Amino acid sequence: MPLSSAQRRALAAEANRLKATVTVSAGALGDAVVSHVRTALGSHPLVKVRIHADDAATCDAAAAELAARVPCELVQRVGRVALLFRPPESDAPGGA
């Protein structure tokens, strides 16, 4: 479910008040980290993740990998913080 640019802007504006919920190392995106992000997205549909990386390219790759493994949408990455979104289960097709 790709997000439109208007949806991305709205989510980014909503995320301004959020603090980073999860902090990870770019080289340590194991199953425990993925599980922790899934749990965080289960509680809140919008989560900020701080990624400790040496450069922007490594941070981009880690954010994309994390979004693919969770699975969720990577809304944006600003600096070393990635904004991840997954709609609540009730909004997903086939949800309750």
Image (cartoon, helix red, strand yellow):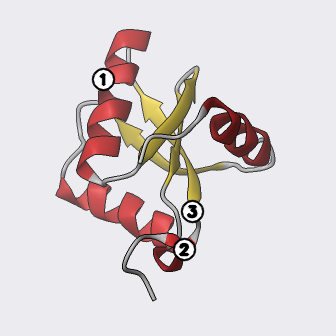
As drawn, 1 above or below 87? above
Percent of width and height locating residue 69: 24, 49
For mark 3, give the secondary structure: loop
CA distance for labels 3 and 1: 22 Å
* CA neighbours of label 3 inside 10 A, class few (<14), some (14 to 19), many (20+): some
| Viewer can see residue 34 | yes
Q: How many marks?
A: 3
Q: Amino acid at mark 2?
A: Ser
User: From the viewer's perspective, is 38 left or right of 86?
Assistant: left
As drawn, 36 above or below 5? below
Residue behind mark 3: 45
* CA neighbours of label 1 inside 10 A, class few (<14), some (14 to 19), many (20+): few
Residue behind mark 2: 43
* CA neighbours of label 2 inside 10 A, class few (<14), some (14 to 19), many (20+): few
Residue behind mark 1: 61
Percent of width and height locating residue 49: 51, 43
Percent of width and height locating residue 24: 39, 42
Q: Amino acid at mark 3?
A: Pro
Q: Amino acid at mark 1?
A: Ala
| Viewer can see residue 55 | no
For mark 2, give the secondary structure: helix
Please tell me which residue is depicted at 58% across the width and 36% down the height of the picture: 4
Please tell me which residue is depicted at 48% across the width and 58% down the height of the picture: 86
Instruction: Tell which circle, 2 or 1, labels the residue nearer the N-terminal end.
Output: 2
CA distance for labels 3 and 2: 7 Å
